[in-house]
Structures are given as C-alpha cells and as structure tokens.
Amino acid sequence: MTSVAITQTELTEMIEEVSKGLSINIDSYIDKASTYINDDMDIDKKLDYLIKVALDHIDEAGPDWTYAAARMYLQKLYRQAAENRGYDFEVQHYGSFYRLIQELTEKGIYSSHLLNKYTEEEISYFGTIIQPERDLQFTYLGIHTLATRYLATDFEKNTYELPQERWMVIAMYLMQNENEKQRTKLVEEAYWALSNLYMTVATPTLANAGKTHGQLSSCFIDTVDDSLQSIYDSNTDIANLSKNGGGIGVYMGKVRARGSDIKGFKGMSSGVVPWIKQLNNTAVSVDQLGTRKGAIAVYLDVWHRDIEAFLDLKLNNGDDRMRAHDIFTGVCLPDYFMEQVEKRGDWYLFDPHEVRQVMGYSLEDYFDEEKGSGSFREKYQECIEANLTSTKRVPAIEIMKRIMKSQLESGTPFMFYRDEVNRTNTNQHAGIIYCSNLCTEITQNQSPTELIEEFVEAEQTIVKKYKAGDYVVCNLSSINLGKAVVDGVLSRLIPIQVRMLDNVIDINTLPIKQAELTNKKYRAIGLGTFGWHHLLAVKGMKWETEEAVQYADQLYEKIAYLTIKSSMELSEEKGHYPMFNGSKWSTGMYFEEKEYTDEKWTALKEEVKEKGMRNAYLMAVAPNSTTAMIAGSTASIDPIFKPFYYEEKKDFKIPVTAPNIDHHTYDIYRRSAYIVDQRWSVRQNAARQKHIDQSISFNFYVPNTIRASVLLDLHLQAWREGLKTTYYVRSTSNDVEECEWCQS
C-alpha cells in the first residue's frame, strides 16, 4: 500500500463524515485519536488507530461506536481495492464491476461462467445498480468477518472485491441458468435480498459462489454399511468432502458391535470405536483448505451393544485408546427408550449384525408409526424374547446418566429422536432417516452405497460398480428475522430465497457422485432463520412468556406457508422433484398431519397436489452464527450470549453489543443465554418445530452445576413436546446469576 499522508484537518473531516447519523461523541473521538496519531503515519496506520479508538468505546451505552469502527475499516478496504484495481478512490469507492470480473477471471479467481453466461452490457448494468451506501449497515464484527474470510482476493491476498460486489456476484452466479427473459430481474431481486441483509446464504455459498474452487453446500450425511469395503469407502468420501469444506454426519448404527462374529469366527469384531477413531484421524488430517479441522459427527443407536463405549468417546479420563476427542457424537433415541427412562425401566442392547443374522431384519429400519405403538417396539420386543447371545440388559436411566455426564463434560452427544423424525418425514414412501447432520437441523432419507462388482475392463483398467445410496446434502440459507420481519418483506423475500437455494442444486459441483445423485433426486433445501432474540427485543416481547411462544407459532407458520407456496410455484415453472409422487406432499397428508385446515392452507394443499413441489425437504434452522455476525443480528433461534461481550477468535478479540440495544430492549437482552429459563426455550422450539419439516439446531444453556434431575427433565420435556433433535448442552463454569429455574 502506498504511503499517503493526511492532515489534522482531513482527519477531523474523516471522523465527522463516518460519524454522521451515529450517537457517538465526535469531540471525544477526535481528542482520543489525536493522542495516537501523528503526521508521519501513513493513512493505513492512521485508520488502524481510528478503528481502535472506536472499538475501545463500544459498550451497552455506546453501541453505535461499532458502526464508526466499521466505516473506518471500510475506508481501508475502499483504498486498497482502488489501488489494486487502478481507479481513483477519491472519485469513487467502487470501481468498474465489469473490469473486476474480467481481471479476477483472468487471474483464475472467478469462474469463467460469469463472463460466459452474461454479456458485458448485462454485467455493466448490474454494476450500476450496486448500492455502496448499503455498506453502512455493517457492524465492525460483520465487515471484519466478511472481508477477512469471504471477499475475493488475488492469490497474494490483496483486496479486490468489495462487499456489495460479493452480493452481486452471488446473485449472478446463482441465477446464471435462469431464462434470460426474467434473469436480470431475478439477479436484481437476489441482490436486493442479500445487500439489505434480509437474508444470508450458507457459509460455503458465501465463500465460493462465483469462484473457481470449492462447492456451495454446507454439510452431508453418510450411512456406513456393515462391511470393510463400506467403512473404508466412507472414510475416503468423508476425506474428500472435508477437503472441500463440508461438515459431515455419519450413521454407524449398521456396523457390528465389539465381540461380534466375522465370517463365523466368534468374538472377532472390535466394534465401532476403532472405525470412529479412524474418522477422528481423518477430521484432523484432512483440514478444510487450511482454515480449520474437518468437522464430523458420528451417530449411534441407543440400543447398539457399543453404546456405552461410544458415550465415553469424548471424556477426558479413562483409556485414551478408546477416546476420539476431535469428532462429535450423536445418539439416536426411540420413544420407547425415553419411556423406559421416565419409568426407570430396563433397556436392552443388541449387536446389529446378530439381529440381522438371527432375526432376518435390521432393527434400525423400523420406527413407531404412532406415539406409544408401532413397528420398532414390536421388533425390539422380538429381539428381547429371542435371547440373542449379544443381549445386554441395563437400567435405561443408567444409559441416560452416561449421556448427560458426557454432555456436561463435552457438550455432546446430540439427541436425535428418531420416531418423531420418521413419523413426520414427508418422503416416508422413499426411505428412512437414521440420523441427523453435524448441526442437527437436517433430516432426510438415507441409505448406504453398496459395491456391486469390481472387474478388469481392459488392460490396466479396473472398474468398480456401485449402487448409489441416499447421501444427504444440505443446501442452506437463512432469513434475518430482526430485519426482514420488521421491514415486512417476507412475502417478497422467501420466493427469491427458495429459488436461489434450488439453483444451488443444479450449479453445485460435488466431489461425491452419490451425493450429486441424491441432491437431484430430492432437490432438498434448508431455509432457516436467525435473529430470533433480536426480533423479540425489537418487538418488546420477553423470552419467558406465553406471548413469545405464540409468536413463534404464528411467525413460523407464515414462513412455512410462504416457503411451501414458493416451492410449489417453482415446480409449476420447472417441474417437481423426481420422488414427488407418493410423498406426503402429493397425497396432502403433510397438511393434514400439521392440522392446516383453514381456507388459505386448504387451497395451497390442493395446488401442491396438482402442481407438485420443486423440493422434497424445505425448512431447517441451522446454527448460522457466522452469517448472523455478518448481518449484525443474533444467532439462529438462540438467546444472545450476553448484552455485551467479546467475540474471540485466534486472530482477534472484538467487542460486541446486542443489536438495537437501548433502554427499550436492554431488559429483554438482559435475560441472556445462561439466565433465561430453558423450559421456555423448549416451548418456543416445540411451537416452531410444528411448522418446520426438517429440524432445528437447538442448544441448551446450563450451568455445569445443574442438578442431573433438572437436565433430565429438560430432555424429557424436549422429547414429549415433539422436538426432533437437540444440539449442544452448552454448560458454563461461570457463576450464573438469576438462575432460579435451574435450581427447581
């Protein structure tokens, strides 16, 4: 960066300019800055000090200082981009959009699709509708996160792309294959949605859309079969996905238990733990483009003979050869287990291999079709009565205690309530759901991929033929509730958001062929939300109230209606997903199970039956903490961590206040994550879960001194009220003030 001197007068003018419309003390800003800054410093150094001064002022009483810091940071970005791209910063903050795309395409940063699909005239037009003033919406944490992680740079990390250009490139990239008669309008709508921060796309889409490398989907779910071939094939697939930045859920429930037979030889199997340790090594060894370790969640059924060793995997004591500290665990729970926990009954563990060999079926392939009765408990009872050699009887509450012990020590296992998930599966006709993903919001049909044959086709050519299983892909984006609901734009926003998600499916390049096939077969998307606590604060609603529960019910019903309607309209335009016929969408059963009976819903049900659905699965609420930071809101459906705190990563520590915090909203934010009564959080989640066809990343926030009976009651409440999954049990060792609920 070229050294540029600015005078004290220019410095004062710069501070006054960035402070326009903000509730900050300008005189204090100028005085403090003057103590740090001298005329010998170049402009970058001066801006760094101006940012530091603004950050030092941020607290609950001075939240606007984050915007002052953000605007100073933007000055740095604008100057760097202008120098690297060869235009005059003093004349314009943003340079030629077409030249940017040309240059970064030539450098191998941008995909050639942008220039191949769009004319120079179209790209130049898109450049004219870019709104630089929308950069002023960013908090400092938001713009810092976007700039350091997601904006396109050259290979030497020099600044080229600016924030509004990132939004426009994403809009263009996702709309590239649309009909040219409507494409320009669709790009404009997508840009409107992104640039106003009404929505965010998933992190991989945010990072990779329009670029030459990386894929656009957030996470995947694999199902491992009980064979050496499947175990090692799965590990290779997971390594390839991890390399490309995907988080992975892995179902291991089909793999035989420790002490099981191998080819008739008694007691030879080492069980699931050694294979999970291999996945642990993969997570550590194959990092995500050098940015972070691979992220893998492994799920096991609570009736699996290895469940006790599995629940100890994350503990910090005991035999380290039986530990896997870098993976995450999840446990698959049938209703019957929770009933036995509640009544302090017995629970039985089985080896899935022996069940298959002796009983002729797989226990994991069944679920209870109704609450309190169904196929799973019938088959489970048959297995008990068969006196299988692997059967082990344990008190159900003892298993639950081990689950909770691990949760308080490591945050996991995640909870997956398999009967509720499968009862509400919109595509029950096409398969079964064994587990969830890394973040517990995705529930879609799964099946293992099987090797059919391996043969030599020609000299030195070996061919392997596989029967592809359902390898789940998560395509995600989220509504910013604190902005989109307040501005009343949901009915305009959701149709463009669903279209963007649907287009990801066709544009994406996935490294795993069976994932590609599954993606096209179901065309599954996951439209989610963030900013729930933000929205409650702006609306003046307290978290621990019936009003908030009812509002969650009403709002998510509206989001569900608009999302289903949007997918139906896309189906009318482009055709329904291949597995539509026979689904609960096609029969109308989805609407009946949800008890959507008013005139509006009844009309939509008939339209869906007639016109189809573009997407098999529609809604899922992900954790989206990073994208919520960028949008300046609160994460997912979680309460805020604190009204004022420091966001810490390995390379920064940034002060953060709750969004829109003032004397009106402070009292609502004051009831933050570790203070708010978690029972109200469960009730809110149950209300919204009714309207979400997949699931929700839902955390419990508890003190680590919580009584076991209280944590148990939370889990039982979550199960009874129809939650499909729960995510981390986030416990804190800090003293928790006002935690009356966790003592009761």
Image: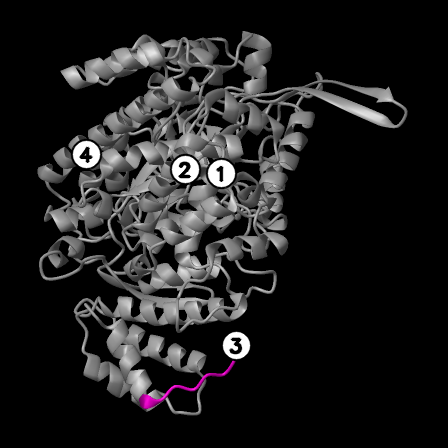
**Residue wearing tag 3:** 1
**Residue wearing tag 4:** 555
Q: Which numbered disc, 1 or 3, marks the residue that appears first in the sequence? A: 3
**Residue wearing tag 2:** 476
Which residue is located at x 32 percent, y 45 percent? 192
Where does residue 453 sit, x and y in percent of width and height? 74, 17
Q: Is residue 2 magenta?
A: yes
Q: Is residue 473 magenta?
A: no
**Residue wearing tag 1:** 217
Instruction: Tell me which segment is drawn in magenta.
Output: 1-8
Asked whether the residues under the numbered discs 4 and 3 touch, taking CB atoms below 8 Å apart as contact, a structural biologist would say no
In-image side of 130 versus 273 (left or right)? left
Towards the viewer: 186 or 379: 186
Asked whether the residues under the numbered discs 2 and 1 touch, taking CB atoms below 8 Å apart as contact, a structural biologist would say yes
Mark 2 and mark 4: span between their CA atoms?
20 Å
Asked whether the residues under the numbered discs 2 and 4 touch, taking CB atoms below 8 Å apart as contact, a structural biologist would say no
In-image side of 620 versus 251 (left or right)? left
Q: How is the image coloured?
A: one colour
Residue type marked 3 = Met
Question: Is residue 701 shown above or below 228?
Answer: below
Residue type marked 2 = Leu
